[in-house]
Amino acid sequence: MPSNSDSVKVAVRVRPFNQRERNAGSKCVISMNGNSTTITDPDSGQTKAFSFDHSYWSHDGFTETKDGVYMREADHYADQRQVFSDLGKGVLDNAWQGYNAALFAYGQTGSGKSYSMIGYGPNKGIVPITCEELFKVIESNKDKDKQLQVSFSMLEIYNEKVRDLLVKSKAETGGLKIRQDQKAGFYVEGLKHVPVRNYKEIEKLMEQGTVNRTTASTNMNATSSRSHMVITIRFNQVIMGADGKSNTRSSDINLVDLAGSERSSSTGATGDRLREGSAINQSLSTLGNVIR
């Protein structure tokens, strides 16, 4: 996530055990102290520590309310709001200053990426909270010389093909084309950008896109995301000058929920699932090369 002081920030989060792991009697080998994360080899007891900008402990220390909200019981527990405060708020600050920003959720299949980014039920993730907070500020704008405009797009990259998630048709095609413009840079030709006036409209679009996203069951995750999903919030600030001419400050917020990396031996993938996994791993390796 770009910011004024750093070009990239990296955070890691550990989730609770799922039912499969509880049934297997799994033992947590992760511990956290401040921004340091330590992995312990369960066989040898040897440890290895890694430092990140943020280390979030969400494995335990919480309780679930009647409404399904995960509430903090222990001080060390990191809830959805804390993750947004540390990561999503910086993305919003960049957008107001006219900078583009991107936030990626990367990890093994079933590691909790979609929960952190989108959330489940009342436990909203970074994406909906970011949209909600953006419109809170927009609705409080009293400056008559400043017009604020927001548009929303949502796509997936599945088996190396780009598909618009806001379009209902699931017919097999060659996918949307990626083009490059000298001024605008890279863009997806034909991708639907929907103007939105409030958070409720974004929420509705997000639900529609999530339903259209490609998922499948593997041995490691019953609802494994089989595609990379990119949500782009385009934020324009149109400012009128004293001479009657307008100046537009534009920024793109890219929120990316990547498909999970995986080993076919662990997921039990065969046929279509195996081909999907191969495409996923190849694209994640390419992304890693780009970041390095």
Image (cartoon, rainbow, N blue to C red):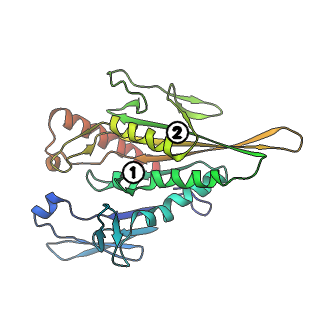
The residue closer to the viewer here, 2 or 22, is 22
Residue 278 appears left or right of 143: left
Q: Is residue 292 visible?
A: no
Is the residue 187 above or below the residue 108 in the image? Answer: above
The CA distance from mark 2 to mark 1 is 15 Å
Q: Earlier in the sequence, mark 2 or mark 1?
A: 1
Which residue is the extreme one toward the right? 243
Which residue is the extreme one toward the left? 24
**What residue is rendered at 42% in x and 28% in y?**
167
Q: Quadrant of residue 23?
A: bottom left
Residue 14 appears left or right of 152: left
**What residue is rendered at 24% in x and 45% in y?**
223
Residue type marked 1: Ile
Where is residue 247 drawn, in percent x and y? 77, 41
The residue closer to the viewer here, 169 or 25, is 169
Is the residue 187 above or below the residue 3 in the image? Answer: above
- Mark seen at residue 118: 1
Query: Can you identify the residue that label 2 sits on?
Result: 152
Q: Is residue 112 visible?
A: yes
Which residue is the extreme one toward the front? 66
Badge 2 density bin: few <14, some 14–19, many ≥20, Cα 10 Å: many
Q: Quadrant of residue 242?
A: top right
Q: Mark 1 falls on what kind of element?
A: loop
**What residue is rendered at 84% in x and 38% in y?**
245
Where is residue 164 drawn, in percent x and y? 42, 30
Where is residue 274 drawn, in percent x and y? 19, 37
